Image: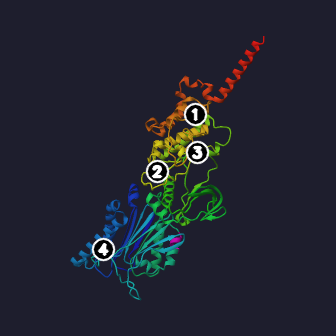
Amino acid sequence: MEFGLCSRTGKRERNEDYAGVYLGAPEERATLGVVAALADGMGGAKGGRVAAELAVRSFIDGYVSEAALRGVRLAGARSLEAINRWTHAIGRADAALQDMGSTFTGLVLQGRQAHVLHVGDSRLYRLRDGRLTLLTNDHTLRGAGRNHILTRAIGPSPALQIDYLKEEARTHDRYLICSDGVHGVLPDRALAEELARRTSPEETASHIIDAATDGRSADNMTAIVLDVLSLPVANLADLQRAAAALPIIPPPSVGERVDDYSLSAILADGPYSRVFRGLDETTGLPVVVKLPKPSVAADAVLRQAFLRESWITTRIRSPFVGECVDVPASRRSCLYTVMPFYEGETMERRLTRTPTIRLASGLQIAIALARGVAALHRAGVIHRDIKPDNVILQNDGGLKLVDLGVARLPQLEDVAMAAAPGTPSFMAPELFEGAPGDELSDQFALGATIFRMFSGAYPYGEIEPFSRPRFGRPVGLLKLRPDLPAWIDRTLSRAFAVKREDRFNDVLELIYEFEHGADRASPADDVRLPLYERNPLMFWKAVSALLAIALFAALAALHR
């Protein structure tokens, strides 16, 4: 945020305008934001300057002390109402300040929102994409020669009616707050041209006052210019508002466009969503566009999935977790998510090709995937659907854990679902009993995923949806991959143990085992399993061959 302020007395004896900007300490801005306010003292009454300065200073003080507790609208309104009562009382009791009053226009930029509190005829403008918009209404009488007479202001009445507006702020927005000494002589077109030059806020404010002076303004002239250079990452409330406002449209077909994204191929088409490979026509970059399908029954679930993916991917920075593209509100007409297109293939698809994944490369994949899961857990996020289909093995050797649509967030309560979130063959036993999912259930899915990567099988067999499986003894990894060391089998068996208390304390401990398990393996681990356990079919073929040889030898001996 950058701002500039300029105020001049003009042809008046004294300057009865007062303006202020509160930036606060960096650690305060998440809760308080940035505050800019302007008040124009009523020139026809005594104490106009006192009323204006009181309004701005007291508003900022009152807002700062209450905003964290009460929110912008309530804190601002309470502050202005208290100022109005005091101004009205003093204006009636003190002859030196008789009937004092002022206008007030305040702008609070908090998070990704702009809040406006206004009374009187000062003005607030917003320049966005080259277009100037007036965000306030003048509280004056209508008609020639009467538009300088205020119908609402701070001070004249014991009751105060305040205009309040809230809108989404955008990067590169430029705001102008000005008194009637400016907008009374400069038309909106002239203000738009000056703001669009994009000189520094200080220079722009000064140029606007110069132009008002040249326009023979007979009043005090004040201008505040604020530039929004960047916005904080959207919080959950921001995303909830955005998701609630966006429609869910029937999914398009290949060759169609959604906003600025052309859709070239279908990557996945499920009952609740359709996923396309596409092109961002603004940047020229390949993307993946995921659109929910309209469903009255699943509307809340679909909107929550949008919230989860957007919230998580804008906060977690890990080379092993997929990202979402931040689509500006001005570009978005419906509900969807956009992700970068990662060149590569899913782990599940890789399992359809030979050769099988060897120990060294498999451990690299396992460690990278586990680090992605650990990054989620550090942020309090539970993935709840870790499986090979949600792991992208990139051509450059990287890895991305994707599809966070059913992830559990500490701040977001789950909506009712028809079934427990996740894929049955990778779900921990407690999830089938209604548990919401936690770090240990994610660890179970992670272990089962790595087991499948090495073996092509599931540790407890393939589990059908909506079934209630019985978890017995898992399949031994060495029976399927006798070339692997015993320590990796033990490590994975512990990760997807049926009993929660038998699993690792956290994923970091599992990562340590992947990295150092070979160093701590006992010599007994190098002893190969018997052929019967490694390959029962080969064992019985060998036994049959030996029996046949023995039979022929016995027959030959009888005929001697």
In the picture provided, is 537 more to the left or to the right than 406? right
Of tags 2 and 4, the one toward the viewer is 2
Residue in the foreground of this view, choosing between 269 and 96: 269
Closer to the chain start, of discs 4 and 1, is 4
Q: Amino acid at mark 2?
A: Arg
Q: Give the extent of the magenta segment.
A: 193-197
Residue at image mark 2: 408
Front disc: 3 or 1: 1
Which sits earlier in the primary sequence, circle 3 or circle 2? 3
- Helix, strand or loop for disc 2: loop
Looking at this view, is 167 or 152 the one in front?
A: 167
Label 1 sits on what residue type? Leu
Q: Which residue is mark 4?
A: 51
SS class, disc 1: helix
Q: Nearer the viewer, mark 3 or mark 4?
A: 3
Disc 3 vs disc 2: Cβ atoms closer than 8 Å? Answer: no
Q: Is residue 289 in sight in this rendering?
A: no
Left or right of 7 on screen, residue 383: right
Spatial CA span between label 3 and label 1: 17 Å
Q: CA distance from mark 1 to mark 2?
A: 30 Å
Task: Measure how far apart labels 4 and 1 are at the Cα level.
Answer: 80 Å
Give the Cα distance between marks 3 and 2. 19 Å
The residue that disc 1 covers is 477
The amino acid marked with disc number 3 is Pro
| Residue position for label 3 | 388
Q: Earlier in the sequence, mark 3 or mark 1?
A: 3
The CA span between labels 2 and 4 is 52 Å
**Given contact means CB atoms under 8 Å apart, are the residues at marks 3 and 4 in contact?**
no
Where is residue 184 drawn, in percent x and y?
Answer: 43, 81
Q: Where is residue 402 drawn, in percent x and y?
A: 55, 50
How packed is label 4: few (under 14 Cα within 10 Å), some, or many (20 or more)?
many
